[in-house]
Amino acid sequence: MADQHHQAGDIEASDWIDRHAPGPARPYLRLARLDRLIGAWLLLLPCWWGLALAGAGVTEMRLFILFAIGAVIMRAAGCTINDMADRKFDVQVARTATRPLASGEVSMARAGVFLALLLAAGLALLTAFNAITFVLALAALPLVALYPFMKRITWCPQAFLGLTFNWGALLGWTALRGELESAALALYGGAALWTLGYDTIYAHQDKRDDALIGLKSMALRLGVNTRPWLFVFYGGAVAGLAVAGWMAELNTVFYAALAVVTAHLFWQAARVNTDDAADCLATFKSNLWTGLLVLAALFLGQGAL
């Protein structure tokens, strides 16, 4: 039986989990956000960018697949940590009140066990990578653990998310090259600004509830001035990508393709209605296309397409 309360928040009733998953597994699949894979895609794509920038092609398909599996696992772990930390806030926000921990479907103890299993799976997966990638991935764990608390102490939790969510750009590069170089750092910086933009749009969904319960966000900080700042964030993201391409000596086709990425990002900034939660969510989700366009640009820049 589909849970009727799913319709009240950001969980859709009668989705594939309700239709096909065993009842006891449903809350954990939702806790892992397997009903909404946009987050996993946005975590994965910077990993693939790092691989593509480093020169990976079809012969390195194993690495692309490993990162895809890792992104799903770590997105699930990150969401579990976030919901464990925010359960008392989530119950006060209409969009998040039906999440498994906030609603009581999953206890803190069971969520802790679930998290331990996810982290163990992630650690096992890391053994398939070289030593520097293994160590660098472990270095990201403090960022993952601290992120849920940033909205309580800073107006810029989206900036912290950018640093956390795009760590994979560094991992993708080192997984192929075996060392960290300046081109990867430029890619990381550009990707972090991309996240700062799209997550600021996302945060506008909750700005009224966040203001009432005392949480901070770039949406609340910028308010009606959000639009010009989106152009700044996205312009910086494109600049970072361009510098990364130059450092990696990509061909001129990369820059032509990057112009398409720029047009898409500026389209988002120009047209998003930050007072319409549905439009904010749709614009946020359109960043899947942004990420895929960047990936195509990187492959084209290497002459791989």
Image (tube, rainbow, N blue to C red):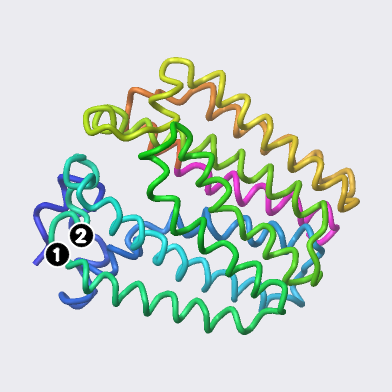
Magenta segment? 285-305
Mark 1 residue type: Glu
Quadrant containing the N terminus is bottom left
Observer able to see residue 278: no
Residue beneath the point at 71% across and 36% down: 238
Per the picture, the main secondary structure of the magenta-coloured stretch is: helix
Q: Measured along the vertical axis of the image, is residue 302 above or below residue 201? A: below
Q: From the viewer's side, name the closer residue of 162 and 17.
A: 162
Quadrant containing the C terminus is bottom right
Mark 2 residue type: Leu
Q: Residues within 10 Å of mark 2 (few under 14, many from 20)?
A: many
Residue beneath the point at 77% across and 77% down: 59
Q: To which quarter of the image does residue 282 belong?
A: top left
Q: What x and y, as percent, mark residue 20?
A: 23, 73
Q: From the viewer's side, name the closer residue of 65 and 124.
A: 124
Is residue 286 in the magenta section? yes
Q: Hey, which residue is sitting farthest top in the picture?
A: 224
Residue beneath the point at 81% across and 52% down: 183
The reply to whether the C-beta atoms of the residues labelled 1 and 2 are less than 8 Å apart is yes
Is residue 84 in the magenta section? no
Image check: 297 left or right of 208? right
Q: Which mark is residue 101?
A: 2
Badge 1 element? loop
Image check: 281 left or right of 210? right
Q: What x and y, as percent, mark residue 286?
A: 49, 42
Q: Which residue is mark 1?
A: 105
Q: What x and y, as percent, mark residue 295?
A: 68, 54
